[in-house]
Image (tube, rainbow, N blue to C red):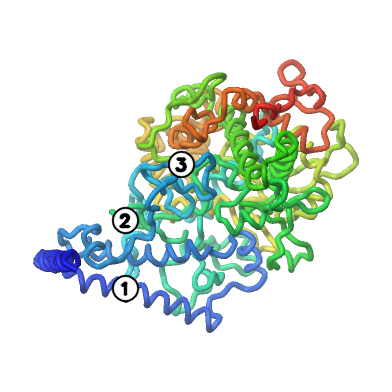
């Protein structure tokens, strides 16, 4: 009782002190913040119940396919974050000296991100990444905010009661920035200068999308009970800040089908992970680790739904395909076939992504079967966890050994010490390194792969000859798992035999005009959405990021832009008023690639730093020497010998394959070999003694 009395006295003193600070009354500000949040929620609920501002059915199926319902956990974080951010804004506006941390302590408002009280030692990763870092248990965990390398470029919301977290939309001249759709049409539309890569196979692109989904899943704002908001036809009941629409020019083809704008829903609102700044951040529903979570899921509910609970295996459907989603997905109902289920809800987006997921589920079950044979006494849980641990290690190894050097080139791989070891253990884990995916990586840099996508996908026979099956268009493969099942082997051979495109500003027509289209004219423009998402998430301009990495910047179009060819400089000048206005996405894609990298210098720096953090900040990194999660030297030797080619041979109907699967076959350097000649992963070192 005495302790409680002392605490009560201290709280009274603190509140009294805070009330004495000029222009600050914590109680009043807190009530104002709570009222603002409650009024917003009331508008959401009224609109939902009256069925106002809800998307029409054909567009609802598209957005439902893109974004599963906002998880309850994310929705809870969002509401608490809004309260914290409102209080922070009101404190800043009041001009007082009370910090947000002091205000939260005084009012009892809780930060939405609560670390566990302790982190037990474990051989296995948690599903959601919590406690990977024992000193900072939430770093890199699912359902935490993206990290920042430089402060966000937000503006003051023009609405009367708006916060200072409005998207970047003002040019250096004081006028509005050009519409993201205008930039897409003038800078990013596919043209004759686009070219296929001379060396990279399309599997390089497929893997990049898989990796992106391992480390980033931006939670979308979706209103009350995940209702799909019709941002282009908002009524007066709509809260003004949730939509950030993309304007259409009078001559835009979308106008011909009656569209007034491209509706754009802002990212779900979060606050900073420590609730120290109270500025708007975005929530990452994925972990920030290369951990196989897209295969296994990040929640217990999802992970359990994917397990057989027998022999450590994952669920498959006939004939050895991913399990089907039995939740009556609206897009499945509209098209008359079901969608697949996986550890990541975006698995059905396009056929090549389905293929990568399918390969890893099969590889999991193949390894689990062998481990059970080697260790008859192991129960289901041990088999599942050991197999998951191995698969995660293989994904890390392939990503850093085979894929990342092609993305970044030798110079950046060396600068950021990203090469995997050929022997021994990695001892550079640093608990002070934050492994969290950065907002710039998620919002912009990892989207470089969109320019690599080809318009046609060949379906090839066993000998990789042309065959008789017509090539499939990119647009026909969006959310079409039935086509994947029908053409699986031929499509996967096509990914190995056909080139990706080079990174350049140009994005395929099906991505810039017909993305996820279910009826004529209701598709999306991926390039425009990428630009708008960067602005929504407060990503600073292209020049600001050049300065961050000490790269020269252009101060006028007439003098030229460093690293960007003259013809593309002129294209950028045709839409932007000043080099300082250029969006990071558009500027970085125009850069000339250097040093054998698949990306330009700026994206190489951003991604080099990010993948360094992923490695240094991962306590469960596969090369670690830290017990109990470390592999033995013999086990690590076997993991280091695995290639993507071996994994594909073991799980697809292939007779031959090129040893470097991310590169095209080449007679002298990467000639196809028989799958039977590829060294096999030996699991004997996992035999229990």
Q: Which of marks 3 and 2 is nearer the N terminus?
A: 3
- The location of residue 343, given as percent across then percent down, is 62, 52
Total marks placed: 3
Residue 164 appears in which quarter of the rendering? bottom left
Q: Residues within 10 Å of mark 2 (few under 14, many from 20)?
A: many
* Residue positioned most to the bottom: 50
The residue where tag 3 is placed is 121
Mark 3 and mark 2: Cα distance apart in space = 27 Å
**Compared to 17, does 429 lie above or below?**
above
* Residue positioned most to the right: 468
Residue nearest the viewer, comparing 4 with 417: 4
Mark 1 and mark 3: Cα distance apart in space = 40 Å
Residue nearest the viewer, comparing 200 with 7: 7
The residue where tag 2 is placed is 275
Of circles 1 and 3, the one toward us is 3
Residue nearest the viewer, comparing 382 with 327: 382
Callout 1 secondary element:
helix
- Disc 1 and disc 3 in contact, CB within 8 angstroms: no
Residue 60 appears in which quarter of the rendering? bottom right
Question: Can residue 22 be seen in this snapshot?
Answer: no
* Residue at horizontal 56 percent and vertical 68 percent from the top: 260
Q: How crowded is mark 3: few (under 14 residues within 10 Å), some or many (20 or more)?
A: few
Q: With 645 as the anchor, is 287 left or right in this view?
A: left
- The location of residue 490, given as percent across then percent down, is 82, 41
The residue where tag 1 is placed is 34
């Amino acid at each position: 009782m005495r302790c409680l009395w002392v605490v009560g006295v201290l709280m009274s003193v603190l509140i009294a002190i805070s009330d004495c600070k000029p222009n600050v009354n914590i109680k009043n500000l807190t009530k104002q913040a709570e009222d603002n949040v409650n009024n917003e929620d009331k508008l959401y609920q009224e609109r939902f119940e009256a069925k106002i501002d809800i998307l029409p059915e054909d567009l609802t199926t598209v957005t439902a396919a893109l974004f599963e319902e906002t998880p309850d956990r994310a929705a809870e974080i969002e509401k608490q974050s809004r309260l914290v951010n409102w209080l922070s804004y009101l404190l800043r506006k009041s001009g007082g000296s009370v910090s947000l941390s002091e205000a939260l302590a005084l009012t009892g408002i809780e930060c939405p991100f609560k670390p566990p009280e302790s982190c037990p030692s474990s051989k296995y990763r948690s599903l959601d990444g919590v406690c990977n870092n024992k000193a900072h248990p939430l770093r890199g965990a699912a359902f935490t905010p993206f990290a920042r390398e430089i402060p966000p470029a937000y503006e003051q919301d023009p609405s009367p009661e708006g916060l200072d977290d409005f998207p970047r939309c003002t040019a250096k001249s004081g006028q509005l920035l050009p519409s993201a759709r205008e930039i897409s049409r003038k800078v990013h539309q596919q043209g004759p200068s686009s070219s296929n890569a001379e060396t990279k196979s399309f599997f390089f692109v497929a893997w990049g999308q898989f990796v992106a989904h391992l480390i980033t899943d931006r939670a979308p704002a979706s209103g009350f009970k995940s209702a799909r908001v019709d941002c282009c036809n908002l009524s007066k009941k709509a809260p003004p800040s949730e939509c950030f629409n993309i304007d259409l020019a009078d001559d835009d083809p979308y106008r011909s089908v009656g569209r007034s704008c491209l509706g754009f829903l802002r990212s779900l609102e979060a606050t900073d992970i420590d609730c120290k700044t109270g500025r708007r951040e975005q929530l990452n529903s994925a972990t920030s680790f290369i951990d196989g979570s897209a295969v296994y899921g990040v929640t217990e509910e999802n992970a359990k739904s994917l397990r057989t609970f027998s022999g450590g295996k994952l669920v498959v459907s006939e004939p050895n395909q991913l399990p089907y989603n039995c939740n009556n997905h609206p897009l499945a109902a509209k098209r008359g076939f079901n969608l697949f289920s996986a550890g990541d809800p975006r698995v059905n987006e396009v056929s090549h992504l389905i293929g990568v997921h399918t390969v890893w589920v099969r590889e999991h079950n193949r390894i689990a079967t062998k481990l059970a044979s080697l260790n008859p006494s192991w129960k289901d849980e041990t088999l599942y966890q050991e197999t998951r641990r191995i698969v995660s290690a293989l994904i890390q190894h392939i990503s850093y050994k085979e894929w990342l050097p092609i993305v970044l080139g030798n110079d950046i791989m060396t600068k950021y010490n990203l090469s995997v070891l050929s022997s021994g253990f990695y001892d550079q884990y640093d608990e002070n390194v934050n492994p969290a995916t950065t907002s710039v990586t998620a919002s912009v840099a990892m989207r470089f792969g969109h320019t690599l996508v080809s318009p046609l996908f060949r379906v090839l026979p066993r000998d990789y000859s042309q065959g008789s099956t017509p090539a499939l268009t990119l647009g026909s493969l969006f959310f079409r798992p039935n086509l994947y099942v029908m053409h699986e082997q031929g499509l996967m051979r096509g990914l190995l035999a056909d080139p990706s495109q080079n990174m350049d500003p140009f994005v395929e027509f099906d991505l810039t005009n017909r993305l996820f289209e279910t009826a004529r004219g209701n598709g999306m423009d991926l390039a425009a959405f990428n630009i708008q998402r960067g602005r929504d998430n407060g990503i600073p301009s292209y020049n600001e990021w050049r300065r961050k990495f000490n790269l020269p910047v252009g101060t006028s179009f007439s003098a030229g832009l460093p690293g960007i060819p003259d013809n593309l400089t002129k294209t950028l000048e045709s839409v932007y008023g000043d080099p300082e206005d250029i969006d990071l996405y558009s500027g970085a894609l125009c850069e000339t690639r250097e040093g054998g990298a698949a990306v330009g210098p700026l994206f190489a720096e951003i991604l080099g730093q990010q993948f360094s953090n992923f490695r240094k900040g991962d306590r469960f990194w596969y090369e670690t020497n830290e017990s109990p999660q470390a592999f033995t030297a013999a086990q690590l030797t076997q993991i280091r010998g695995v290639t993507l080619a071996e994994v594909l041979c073991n799980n697809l109907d292939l007779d031959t394959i090129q040893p470097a699967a991310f590169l095209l076959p080449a007679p002298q350097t990467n000639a196809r070999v028989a799958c039977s000649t590829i060294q096999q992963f030996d699991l004997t070192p996992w035999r229990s003694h």
